[in-house]
Image (cartoon, rainbow, N blue to C red):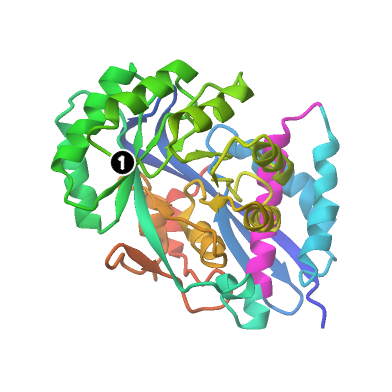
Amino acid sequence: MRLKISKVEVIPIRVGLSRIYRGSYYQMSRRCTLITRLYTEDGIVGEAYNADADEEQAEIASIINRELSSIVVGMDALNPLQCWEAMFRITYDELRNRWYAMQAIACIDTAIWDAVGKVSGMPLYRLWGGYTNRMPVIAIGGYYSESISDIEKEIEKYCQLGVLGVKFKIGGRSPKEDAERLKRAVSVAPSGFRFMVDANQGYTLDEALEFVKLTSDFVQLEWFEEPCIWVHDNWLRAFRYKSGVPTVAGQMEYSSSGIRRLIESESIDISNFDASWGGGPSEWLKVAGMALTFGIGLAHHEEPHLAAHLLASHPMSKYVEVFDPERDPIFWNMIENLPQITDGYIALPDGPGLGWKLDETFITKYRADI
């Protein structure tokens, strides 16, 4: 059997957010994505949405339309790794940001795997290993606001959403100020609510260690994500050994070789490599193999619609991450058959491929002109 690719279509989506969300040294006012549809001569359509792109949205879409489409059209979607290797050649251009190229590859690679799942009649989490059919869920939150009292309302919102815990944003203030913010969140959370923190590379090594010391008497952190600024690779390893807190990094890597370096340098306990930023499921599955070999945990930087399948396929996986509906109106409103979070878990769809049905009315309304 052969599943010949005949056409690739890209649809940019851009949704304005109700407020500006501020992390350590960045801010977001829109939620964006690219819908990729991969058509085959047999009538199977592989569909995906990924590449959490904003200003770079037009560049990534252009790479797909002008370069990758001509590479994969005529190829067999049932050979996803062969397609991936053919596309990977576009990253050899050293004068272009390779991160853009890897996001573009991820769009098509995800759609190819969706097509493979549809032909096989299997959801992708089963095709990739089928370790479990449901995943524990945490929220991403703790964004900086004008009033510290907003933290209480936020924790209440996450409890209503039904998640098991929150990955709390820090790194944009002093360790003392961030510790007070986290303490406020812990004080209003129910017993058993789990806390992770994410500095988004905002602290120096000393600041990250100070934060751990300041919070150790009122919370046991499940992990500390991206504690230190990016220019000193050795700080990540030093933090891991000095703090005793499980250390997470990898979302800013865009290849499995980048994660390999983090593992070899003993810098991480958990990888949060993002398939949508780093070449797609084909590349993420390489990371998953390394994680099992080296005893490294697996997370995934946001993108729950794809991350749920990837993480559910593997025994080393931790949590699926979601934003609240205001922060991610695409996930909560564009997927028609999205299951509710029940007892802190989300069920994987039973349909073949990714199994999500996208709302065409939403797509039409928020289609961007780029």
Crowd rating for badge 1 (residues with CA inside 10 Å; few <14, some 14–19, many 20+): few
Please give left or right for residue 242 compared with residue 154 in the image. right
Q: Is residue 113 magenta?
A: yes
Q: Is residue 82 above or below residue 27?
A: below
Q: Where does the image place residue 102, in percent across and percent down from the top left? A: 70, 43
Specify the quadrant of the image occupied by residue 113: bottom right
User: Measured along the vertical axis of the image, is residue 338 above or below residue 258?
Assistant: below
Position of 198 with respect to 115 (left or right) is left
Instruction: Please tell me whether the stretch drawn in magenta is mainly helix, strand or loop.
Output: helix
Q: What amino acid type is highlighted by mark number 1?
A: Gln
Query: Magenta region: which residues?
Result: 95-116
User: Could you say which quadrant of the image residue 22 lies in?
Assistant: top left
The answer, for residue 45, to whether it is visible in the render is no
Residue 108 in view: yes
Count of marks, rendered view: 1
Q: Nearer the viewer, residue 110 or 218?
A: 218
7 lies left or right of 346: right
The residue located at (60%, 64%) in the rendering is 47
Quarter of the image where the N terminus is located? bottom right
Question: Residue 299: x and y, percent?
Answer: 51, 51
Percent across and percent down for residue 111 are 65, 62
Q: Residue at the spot x=38%, y=47% of the render?
A: 328
* Residue 167 in the image: above or below residue 191: above
Element on which disc 1 rests? loop
Find residue 237 and report its horizontal and vertical position in percent. 58, 30
Residue 48 falls inside the magenta stretch: no
Residue where numbered disc 1 is placed: 220
Q: Which of the two residues, 220 or 255, is positioned nearer the viewer here?
A: 220
Q: Which residue sits at x=20%, y=39%? A: 186
